[in-house]
Amino acid sequence: MGSDGAKALRKGINKFFGKEQAIQRCGLHKQRSIMKYLDKKQHIEFKRRWKKLHGHVNLVRWLGELNVEAQNAMLDANFETLTVIELKVPNLLRKTLWSTNPIDSVFDKVRSKWNRVKNWSSGVD
C-alpha cells in the first residue's frame, strides 16, 4: 500500500487493511524532505549514503550528527521507504513504486482535462 505519510491515510489503511499491512512511503519525497534540513554541500554525500545505506542505522546516526531535524525526518518515515525492497519487488517495478510521482502525474493530467469539461451529463455511460 502506497502512502505519502499523511496520518489520516495511515489511519484509513490500518482500519481497512489492518495494522500489519505493508506500507511504502515515497522515497523521493522523503529524500527531498530530509535534504531541506542539510546544507547544499552535504547533499551529494547524503544521496550517496541514502542509496547505499538506505534505512541502515548508520545513516540515521550520521544525519543526527549533521542536523536533528534531518534525522527526525528520516525517523518519521519509520523505514517505510524500504517496503518495496523488503518485499523483493523486481527492480523495474521497485523503481516505479519507490516514488509517488507516477501517480501524481496521472492525477495532474486528469485534473487538466477535468477543468476543460463544459457540459457534464449524468448518465450510466
Image: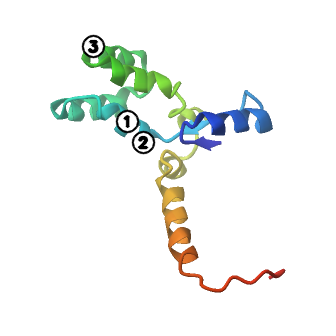
> At 32% across and 15% down in the image, what residue appears?
64
Q: Quadrant of the rendered structure where residue 74 is?
A: top left
Amino acid found under the numbered disc labelled 2: His
Depth order, front residue of 81/74: 74
- Could you say where residue 105 lies in the image, as x and y percent from the top left? 48, 62
Q: Position of residue 109 (x, y in %)?
A: 51, 70
Determine the residue positioned at 54% across, 36% down. 5
According to the picture, the residue beneath numbered tag 2 turns out to be: 29
Query: Distance from label 2 to label 3 (Cα)?
Result: 22 Å
The image quarter containing residue 71 is top left
Image quarter of the C terminus: bottom right
Position of 102 with respect to 2 (left or right) is: left
SS class, disc 2: helix
Q: Is residue 96 left or right of residue 40?
A: right
Relative to 86, residue 59 above or below = above
Nearest the viewer among 105 and 9 is: 9
Residue 44 in which image quadrant: top left
Residue drawn 49% across the image and 25% down it: 76
Q: Position of residue 34 (x, y in %)?
A: 35, 31
Q: Which sits earlier in the primary sequence, circle 2 or circle 3?
A: 2
Colour scheme employed for the rendering of this structure: rainbow
Residue 84 x %, y %? 56, 39
**Amino acid beneath label 3:** Glu
Q: Which quarter of the figure is the N terminus placed in?
A: top right
1 and 2 marks in contact (CB < 8 Å): yes
Residue where numbered disc 3 is placed: 65
Residue 59 visible here: no
Residue 109 versus residue 51 in the image, above or below: below
Q: Secondary structure at mark 3?
A: helix
Identify the residue under disc 1: 33
Q: Residue at x 53, y 64 (%)?
A: 106
In terms of secondary structure, where does tag 1 sit?
Answer: helix
